Image: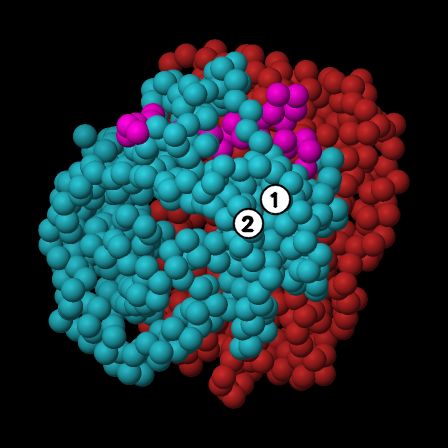
Chain colours: A red, B cyan
Amino acid sequence: MKIKEEVLLEKQGYRLHILPSKKYKTISIVAKFKTPLRREGITERALLPHVLQKATNNHPNVREFQSSFENLYGTVLSSDGTKKGENHVISFRMEVVNEAYLNDQEPILEEALKLFNEVLYAPKVEGEGFDSSIVEREKQTLEQKITSVKDDKMSYANMRLMDHMCKDEPYSLHVSGYQDDISSITPESLYNYYRSMIKNDLLDVYVIGDIDQTEIEKMTDKYFIRENSSNQDNDQVSTSKDVKEVNEVVEREEVNQGKLHIGYRTYTKFGDPDYYALQIFNGLFGGFPSSKLFMNVREKHSLAYYAASRFESHKGLLLVFSGVDPKDYKQAKSIILEQMDAMQNGDFTEEQVEETKEQVIHQLQETMDNANGIIEVLYHQMLSGAEMPVNDLIEHIRKVTKQDVVAMANKIKLDTIYFLTSLEGGE
Amino acid sequence: MEELVYDQINETVYTETMDNGLKVFLLAKPEMAKTFGIFTTNYGSIDQTFTPIGQDEKVTVPEGIAHFLEHKLFEKEDRDVFQDFTKLGASANAFTSFTKTAYLFTATSQIEKNVETLLNFVQDPYFSEESVEKEKGIIAQEIRMYDDQPDWRSFFGTIQSLYHHHPVKVDIAGTVDSIQNITKDDLYACYETFYHPSNMVLFVAGNIEPEAMMKQIRENQDSKEFPAAPEINRSYPDEPTEVAKANNSITMPVTTAKAMVGVKEKVTHLTGKELLRAELLSSMILDYYFSKSGAFYEELYRSDLIDDSFQFETELDRQFGFTILGGDTRKPEEMTKRVKEMLHELKENSISDEDFTRMKRKKIGQFMRALNSLEFIANQFTHYHTLGVDLFDVLPVIESLTSKDAEEYLQNWINEEAISVFQVKPQENE
C-alpha cells in the first residue's frame, strides 16, 4: 500500500484527518456529523442537507450561490444522511481541482473552503429560522422523495425487509424521514434542530489529496473550528437480537419481477476478532460471481440475473437479495437456504478459501485507490475503535482458515425471509 | 510503440497497432494499486443488419444479440471465465451499449496473467445450443428487472418516440420474445464479423510497466492466427429528421409521474474535433440554463414542475444522437410544455462572455475530476477513439470555445419537428 499514514489531530470542536496522496488531481474534503439514531429528529436530519445546500447568508440567492461553485472550476458539494449501525451520520463532501493542474493562479481551495464554512456555519436565516421559502420548497421535495421510494423496487424491498426484521430496533428507522413529520416542521424548528446538531454532533473532517499539512491546518483552523463545542462522542452501541423464530413475509405490488430479500444476523461487528472470517464467509456465500449464490441461483438454475449477499458491519446483519420470477419463489428460496446449509457443513474447498481471500484483499486495495473509499474505511475503523493500517488488515484476512469460516457460518442465524411479488401468483 | 505526452495533465499514453489490426493503448499510473483493462469491440445493439463474413447477402439478426453474445463469451466448454479471474484475485465484468461491447477486469496483482486471460477468452468463443438455451432464462430476468425500473422505461420510451426505424430504438437486451430466437449459429456469425482484432481496442491503465506490457500483448497477438482484416458491411435504415411520435406515454405503477423531453440530433455523422465541439457546446449550453445555477432550472424548480431528480444528457455517436431532459414531476403536462418552450427560447437568448467563462471553468473541473478514475479514462478514451476524437484534446478544445461558438451552435440546434415528449403516468390517473 503506497498510502501515507493518516495524520489525526484533535482540534477545537472537530477532529482533523489529513491524508496526503498523489493519486488524485483533486482535493476532497469531507465533514461528518454523527449522533445516535433516533426516531425524533430523523426527518429534520433528512431535510437539513437539502436546505443547507441552497443558499448562505453571504450568498442568499440560490443561483448566485451555485454559480460561485462553478466559478471555482466546478467545485462540487454534496450531502447525504446514512446509518452507521445505530448512529446517524450526515456527510458533506466537497471536491476541488488541485490548483497545480490549472493555468490559473487563483487560490481555488481556500475560496472553496470558505464556501464550505458558510454552508455549515452561516446558512441563510430570517429572524429565528431558515429562509421560509427554501424550507417550504425543500419540504415538498423531501415528501416526494419519501413517497417515491416505492418506485425503486430493490431499495423498497430492502427497506421493507428492515421494517419487518428490525421492527423494534432503531436500525429500522428510515434515513429519508417520515411523511407524517413534514407538515409540523417550521423554518424555526428546523433551525433549532440545526443549531443543536452543529453544537452537539461528533464532527470529523477529512482532507485527502496532494496537499501540505501545515497549509491545510491553517485553512481548516479558520473554517471548521467550533468554539462552543467540546466534540463529545455519545456513540449508541447497536443492539443484536436473538432470533426466536424465522419470520416469512410476502407482500404484493404490481411488479414483473419478484424481489427475494433475506435477512440473517451475524452477531459479528467491525473490530471483532472473527470479523475477517465474516468477510471470507460472505465472499464464498454471495459476494462475488464465483460465490455459491451466483453459481447456483443464476448459473445452475437460470432463475435470476442477480443473486448476491452483503453484510452490514456495525449492526451485524447479512442480507441476501435476488430478483426472480414470481412463480419461482419457492425454488429460489430453497436454493438460497441450501447454500447457507452448505456453508455451515463446510461444503467448500481450502483452495476456494484462498481464492476468496485474494478477492477480498483485491477489493480492499481497490477501495483504497478511491478518495471517498479511503475516508469511509478510516471513518469506519475509528467508530469501531479498531484502527489499523491496511497492511495489518490484509494480514488478518490471510490468517483466516476454513474452520474459521465454518464457525462463522454456524454463528449466523436466519431471521426474516421477505418476498415482494406480483398481485397474482408467487406463493 | 508510440508515446503521446499530455503535459498539462501530466499523463503519457503509449500506443501501438498490432499486425492483426488491434489497437492497443497503455497508461501507467504507478501510484495506483489497481489496474483496469478493457477490451472493446466496435459493435453494439444497433448493428443488427450486416453482411456476415464470407457471405454475400445481408442478414438481420434477432434483437438483443450483441448483449446475448457478451453473456455467452464468458462460458467455455469446460469452465466459466469469471472463475479464471477469480483464481487471479481479479474481478471481471462486461457491458453492451448501442455501439460497443466491452469486456473488462480490475486487478491489484498478477496483472500480466489477467491481461492474458482477457485477451484469450474474448478471442476464443465457444457457443453450444445447450448453453444458449440456458442463458435465455437469465437474460429474461435481466429484462424483467429493467421492465420494473421507471427511469429506464422513460429513457427508452423517449428514444422510441424519437426514432422511426433506426435500431437505436430497440432495447439493448432485446425482448423476452426476441431472445428466444437466438441460435448458436447467429452468435458465431456476429462474432466472426465483429470481433476481428482490427475492429477492436485494448486499453490497460494503472500499475503497469508499458514497455513490458506492450511486448507481452504483441507476443500474445502474434501467436494467434486471424484471417485478413475484413471490411465490415453494416446497414442501417433511412431515418427521417423528424421524430416518430411527438407525444407518447405509458402507464406504470409509479407514485410520481415522469416526464421527458427528447431532441433528435441531426448531427449524426460528425467525427473528430467537430463531434467533440458539438458535444461540449450542447452540454455547456444545457448546463448554463438547466443546471442548478440556471435561470430555467430555477423557474421550473420554483414552480414545482421539477424536483432533484431532474436530469439532462446529450449522447452523440456514430449513426445517431439525442438530448433528453426530464425527471419526476407532479405536473407532467405543464412541465413538458414549458421545457419545450424553453428549448425554443434558447435561440433567442445569448450567453455573456463572463457566464460562458464560468461554464468553461465548470467543464474543465468536471473533466479533471473524472480523470481520477482509471475506468473513466480507459472507457472514454476508447469511445472517443472509435469516433476519431482524442480524449486528452478535451481540455484544449474547451479552452478554445467562445460564447460566439455557442450562439452559432444554437442557431441550428433545435427544431419543433425534432422534439418528442414522453411520459410515465401513474396508474391511478387512468
Q: Quadrant of residue B355?
A: bottom left
Q: Which of A93 and A182 is in front in this view?
A: A93
- Seen at 32% across and 59% down, the residue is B271
The amino acid marked with disc number 2 is Asp
Q: Is mark 2 on a helix, strand or loop?
A: loop
A378 relative to B232, above or below: below
Residue bounds of the magenta highlight = B56-85
Q: Position of residue A140 (x, y in %)?
A: 34, 53
Can you identify the residue that label 1 sits on?
A: B221
**Residue type at the position of mark 1:** Gln
Q: Distance between the residues labelled 1 and 2?
A: 8 Å
* Residue at (56% x, 51% y) in the render: B18
Question: Taking B283 as reference, is B146 above or below it?
Answer: above
Q: Mark 2 points at which residue?
A: B19
Residue B267 falls left or right of residue A127:
left
Q: Which residue lies furthest to the left in this view?
A: B417
Judging from the image, what secondary structure is the residue with disc 1 in? Answer: helix
| Residue A146 sits above or below residue B275 on the image | above
Q: Where is residue B219 in the image (x, y as percent from the top left)?
A: 67, 47
How dense is the environment of label 1, judged by Cα within 10 Å: few (below 14), some, or many (20 and up)? many
**Foreground: B419 or A179?**
B419
